[in-house]
Image: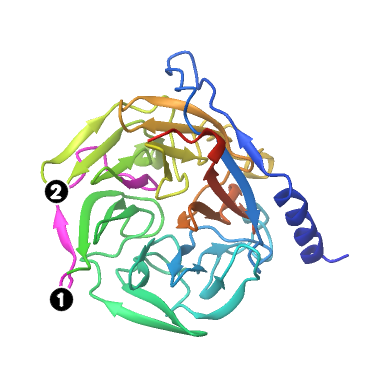
Amino acid sequence: MSFRTLTMLATTTIASAQMCLEAGPANSDTPQPDPTRARLHWSQLPPLPDTNGVAGAFAGTCNGTLIVAGGANFPDRMPWEGGRKVWHDAVWALKSETGSWRSIGKLPRPLGYGFSASTPGGLLCVGGSDSERHHPDTFILSITGDQLSVKPLPPLPIPLANGAGAFLGSTAYLCCGSEQPGEQAATSRFFALDLSRPNPRWEELPPCPGEPRILPVAAAANASFYLIGGAALRPKNGQISRAYLLDAWRYDPSSGWHPLPNLPRPSVAAPSPAPVIHSMLLLAGGDDGSLAGKVTPEKHPGFPSHILALDLASTNWVSFGEVPASRATLPTVEWNGAWVLPSGEMRPGVRSPQVWMLRPDPSTERSK
């Protein structure tokens, strides 16, 4: 039996056993969650046609169709075996939850680790990297019938990858990341693109007051932009290494940046933008750095499965159960009343083609 067949059978089996995961304590310093909060209802969509899966894909919707594009993986050998990282340009589309992925075209170039967002005009794709450099490009993918169109927009002022962004109102916000490959320097610069303007152009806003970082999580909620965690790049023993961050920030377009309570544990490369369900901003996976430098990549057991949630009303951090399959370096997409988490890394260097869907369990939805 082929790997593809086994993957499809596993998907069907798991999808039929949907899970509801309740909140529990994160640690002794974390407040207990409100027991009336919604539980989380998980299921699976068909896996991506790339059986290796990808990290850093672009994803969003256009005319009700789910789109996943680009990203990178190690198709031949793992990195610790000397495998070469390959960036991709494939664009895949899924019309319904019970449908099949189909190829609808290609990106302008192989690309990954940029920012993407669903907009009224299609899937906005910003920045990203390839095997040689980081890019400032901005464009929108749209679908007419079975035809993929690419509409260029003004580029970012700088090349940028590994940042985090979210779409708020008619404006795309993008913060932090790095301008060059190699994880030698990060930025805290902050940009906005208002797509409601006749000739939209990127505007630079005041930078995040926190330390420059890569791989934070962003979110849009309550008319604000949120930026959480990530990794600073600091010199250590003559080399640059990641420092896993705990700080979190809220940007109000009318009053600027405001600090939030620190995370109870670090969060790097969690699915972004963070899903927001019933006033809870969810960090559903990612890397907490607990194994960094302690295990070799080939022995890494996988990223932590716990979910941290920011209660947007109280600004308290709480534990909110676990993800069924933890992932890092992946986008999220709001689609059909749920949040989709396509592909991503299971552990350093190892991707998964699985596509998970998260929605609140309606039986516990709070009355309004």
Query: Does dot 2 land on a helix, a strand or a loop?
Result: loop
How busy is the neighbourhood of tag 2: few (under 14 within 10 Å), some, or many (20 plus)?
few
Which numbered disc covers residue 334? none
Left or right? Give the position of 323 relative to 154: right
The one of 165 and 294 positioned closer to us in this rendering: 165
Which numbered disc covers residue 206? 2
Query: Does dot 1 land on a helix, a strand or a loop?
Result: loop
**Residue 136 visible in the picture:** yes
Q: State the residue lying farthest toward the left.
A: 255
Left or right? Give the position of 209 relative to 345: left
Q: Residue 220: give x, y in percent of width and height.
A: 31, 48
**Residue 295 visible in the picture:** no
How busy is the neighbourhood of tag 1: few (under 14 within 10 Å), some, or many (20 plus)?
few
Left or right? Give the position of 340 relative to 299: left
Give the residue type at disc 2.
Pro
Q: Nearer the observer, disc 2 or disc 1?
A: 1
Q: Residue 359: give x, y in percent of width and height.
A: 53, 46
Q: Considering only vertical position in the picture, is 191 above or below 126? A: above
Q: Quadrant of residue 122?
A: bottom left
Q: Residue 308: give x, y in percent of width and height.
A: 46, 32
Q: Which residue is found at the position 45% from the left and 22% from the top?
A: 34
Q: Considering only vertical position in the picture, is 95 above or below 74? A: below
Viewport quadrant of the N terminus: bottom right
Give the residue type at disc 1.
Pro
Left or right? Give the position of 46 relative to 150: right
CA separation, marks 2 and 1? Answer: 24 Å
- Assess whether residue 203 is covered by the magenta stretch: yes
| Span shown in magenta | 197-220
Magenta-colored segment: predominant secondary structure: loop
Q: Residue 19: give x, y in percent of width and height.
A: 66, 40
Which residue position holds label 1? 198
Q: Which residue is found at the position 45% from the left and 46% from the top?
A: 269
